Image (spheres, grey):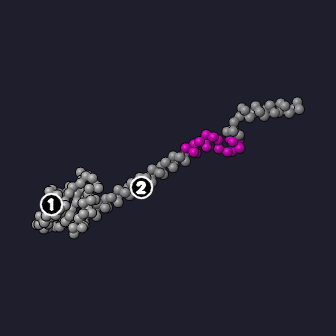
Amino acid sequence: MKKIFPLLIGIILLGSVSSCDWIRARLGMPTSEELQQKQEQIIQDSLEKVAREQEARLEQLRLDSLAKIEAQKSALARYHVVLGSFIMDNNADRMMQKLPDLGYDPVRIEFKNGYSVISAYQTNSLPDAYNKMYKMFSLDITPYDVWVYDTNQQLHF
């Protein structure tokens, strides 16, 4: 027992003096510092991957919106008989829903200043646009501020 007691005390002292990192290093395993660095690298790689994916999604959304705007620009006639200009989307939607019942094919045009205008009639002929505007004054839904918008003014998009 006398020989085992100093051996046990030696093992306890050795265990208290040395750490797991020392044992791991001797066994060829990664130390806690190396594990911490690896964990930080994994987190950094994950954050970079998420940032790249988010940037790719934003770029795709931007390209989609530009393509949509270009398609709308090419589909627009030159003159539009506008029945209203709205900053609130629900008001513009309400006007868009009323016009098909009256036989019009409404088009919503977004202006650069944030307003949406509702065009009830589109044409490439200015006299035709003014004739249609005067006919629309007889409608119950026609406001007093009906006007003809020329897309060459470049107020939209």
Left or right position of 52 against 68:
right
- Depth order, front residue of 115/10: 115
* Magenta span main SS: helix
Image: 18 above or below 43: above
Name the residue rendered at 67%, 39% in the picture: 21
Secondary structure of residue under mark 2: helix
Task: In this rendered view, identify the residue nearer to me: 54 or 104.
Answer: 104
Q: Nearer the viewer, residue 64 or 135?
A: 135
Q: Tell me, yes or no, if residue 105 can be seen here.
A: no
Is residue 114 highlighted in magenta? no
Relative image position of residue 124 (x, y in whole percent): 16, 67
Q: Which residue lies furthest to the front in this view?
A: 140
Q: Mark 1 points at which residue?
A: 148
The residue at the point 65 percent across, 44 percent down is 30
Amino acid type, residue under disc 1 in the picture:
Val
What amino acid is labelled 2 in the image? Ala
Give the class, few, some or many, for how many residues have Cα within 10 Å of label 2's Cα (few <14, many ≥20): few
Q: Mark 2 points at which residue?
A: 56
Q: Quadrant of residue 9?
A: top right
Q: In which quarter of the image is the C terminus?
A: bottom left
Upstream in the sequence, badge 2 or badge 1? 2
Q: Tell how many labels.
A: 2
Q: Which of marks 2 and 1 is in front?
A: 1
Q: Which residue lies furthest to the bottom in this view?
A: 103
Q: Position of residue 80 (x, y in %)?
A: 18, 63
Instruction: Using the image, tell me which numbered label, if any, was put on residue 103.
Output: none
Residue drawn at point x = 43 percent, y = 52 percent: 54
Q: In this view, does 57 lie above or below 76?
A: above
Q: In which quarter of the image is residue 79?
A: bottom left
Placement of the N terminus among the 4 image quadrants:
top right
